[in-house]
């Protein structure tokens, strides 16, 4: 069941905090990648990865993911988001441009790379430290 994000979590995602997305490799071991992310209108999370990369292959096989985001201003404060992911058709270049503008204040024009959009539906949000959640 999808979990609605509270205001603190929304602000965390909307700011320039760098998330790490963990997926499950075929042998059951974790695979993690730093990504650029945004919040969808429905409180899903969206990021871009290169088509055919391990992240996309893992999600296509096993949709369970974990997202860890720390506060760039105060790295001891973080949020863990557990959910399920799916690969969406189209929009990879446009979202990549939007995200690089958000995080890096410029667009990196790399047309020779095929990108896919990944959508994560949050199922559980765990703030750290716990007492910071109001």
Image (cartoon, rainbow, N blue to C red):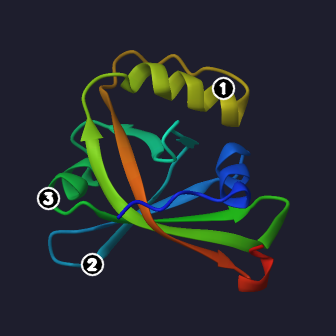
Dot placed on the residue nearer the N-terminal end, 1 or 2:
2
**Does residue 65 appear to the left or right of 104 in the view shown?**
left
Q: Provide residue 42's location: percent of width, then percent of height.
A: 48, 41
Residue under numbered circle 1: 101
Q: Is residue 22 above or below residue 45?
A: below
Q: Is residue 38 above or below residue 73?
A: above
Quadrant (top left, top right, bottom left, bottom right) of the C terminus: bottom right
Secondary structure state at the residue bearing disc 1:
helix
So how many labels did they put on this image? 3
Residue under numbered circle 2: 29
Residue under numbered circle 3: 61
Tag 1: Cα neighbours inside 10 Å, few (<14), some, or many (≥20)? few
Q: Which residue is drawn at 78% across and 58% down?
A: 72
Q: Which of 59 and 112 is in front in this view?
A: 59
**Does residue 6 appear to the left or right of 23 in the view shown?**
right
Tag 3: Cα neighbours inside 10 Å, few (<14), some, or many (≥20)? few
Q: Residue at x 37, y 22 (%)?
A: 91
How far is the residue under mark 1 from the one under mark 2?
33 Å
Q: Provide residue 22's location: percent of width, then percent of height.
A: 40, 65
């Amino acid at each position: 069941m999808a979990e609605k994000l509270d205001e603190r979590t929304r602000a965390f995602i909307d700011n320039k905090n760098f998330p790490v997305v963990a997926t499950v490799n075929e042998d059951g071991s974790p695979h993690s990648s730093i990504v650029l992310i945004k919040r969808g209108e429905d409180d899903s999370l969206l990021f871009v990865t290169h088509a055919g990369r391990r992240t996309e292959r893992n999600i296509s096989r096993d949709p369970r993911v974990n997202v860890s985001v720390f506060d760039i201003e105060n790295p001891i404060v973080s949020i863990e988001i557990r959910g399920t992911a799916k690969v969406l058709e189209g929009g990879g270049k446009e979202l990549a441009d939007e995200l690089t503008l958000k995080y890096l204040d410029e667009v990196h024009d790399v047309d020779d790379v095929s990108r896919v959009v990944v959508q994560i539906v949050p199922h559980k949000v765990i703030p750290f430290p716990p007492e910071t959640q109001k």
